[in-house]
């Protein structure tokens, strides 16, 4: 159970770092990178971990809706759109919010 708690913590930490970088990319280029995992790998390092993957070894997904975007980890069950997903939503300009899985 401690390992899973650590996975949640590290994934939240990554989301809090990745979203501002994606916002900056969007501000500069007016679009998000097509290869999100590649963008994360080229802009971040993590000792013993692939920055393009969450701590359950699944790629993060980025979705857009009008003036905001969401970066999502599918969480412990490795299936997106379930209760355990971890995500951070942000405007394409500034500001963001986190979810708290149940």
Image (cartoon, rainbow, N blue to C red):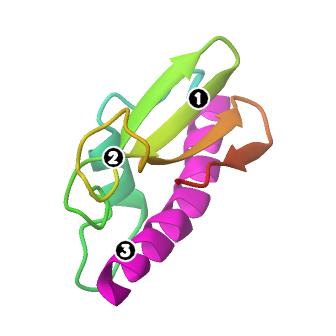
The residue indicated by pointer 2 is 74
Task: Assess whether mark 2 and mark 1 are in contact (beta carbons under 8 angstroms).
Answer: no
Q: Locate residue 89, reporting x and y percent.
A: 63, 38
On the image, which quarter does residue 81 sit in? top left
On the image, which quarter does residue 47 sit in? bottom left
Disc number at residue 69? 1
Please, what secondary structure does the residue beneath circle 2 have? loop
**Alpha-carbon neighbours of circle 2 within 10 Å: few (<14), some, or many (≥20)?**
many
Q: Main secondary structure of the magenta part?
A: helix
Q: Locate residue 92, reporting x and y percent.
A: 69, 29
Report the front residue among 23 and 12.
12
First in sequence: mark 1 vs mark 2? 1
Residue at x 44% of width, y 65% of height: 11
Q: Is residue 92 left or right of residue 77?
A: right
Residue 84 versus residue 79 in the image, above or below: below
The residue indicated by pointer 3 is 7
Please, what secondary structure does the residue beneath circle 1 have? strand
Q: Residue furthest top?
A: 66
On the image, which quarter does residue 17 sit in? bottom right
Task: Assess whether mark 2 and mark 3 are in contact (beta carbons under 8 angstroms).
Answer: no
Magenta stretch, residue numbers: 1-28
Q: Residue furthest front?
A: 102
The answer to whether one can see residue 31 in this image is no
Residue at x 46% of width, y 25% of height: 63
The answer to whether one can see residue 11 in this image is yes
Q: Is residue 101 left or right of residue 68?
A: left
Residue at x 53% of width, y 53% of height: 101
Report the front residue among 49 and 84.
84
Question: Where does the N terminus fall, quadrant-wise?
Answer: bottom left
């Amino acid at each position: 159970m401690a390992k899973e708690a650590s996975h949640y913590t590290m994934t939240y930490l990554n989301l809090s770092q990745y979203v501002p970088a994606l916002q900056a990319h969007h501000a500069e280029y007016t679009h998000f990178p097509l290869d999100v995992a590649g963008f994360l790998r080229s802009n971040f390092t993590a000792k013993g971990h692939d920055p393009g993957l969450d701590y359950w070894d699944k790629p993060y997904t980025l979705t857009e809706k009008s003036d905001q975007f969401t970066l999502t980890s599918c969480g412990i069950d490795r299936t997106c759109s379930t209760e355990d997903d971890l995500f951070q939503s942000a405007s394409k300009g500034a500001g963001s919010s986190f979810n708290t899985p149940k």
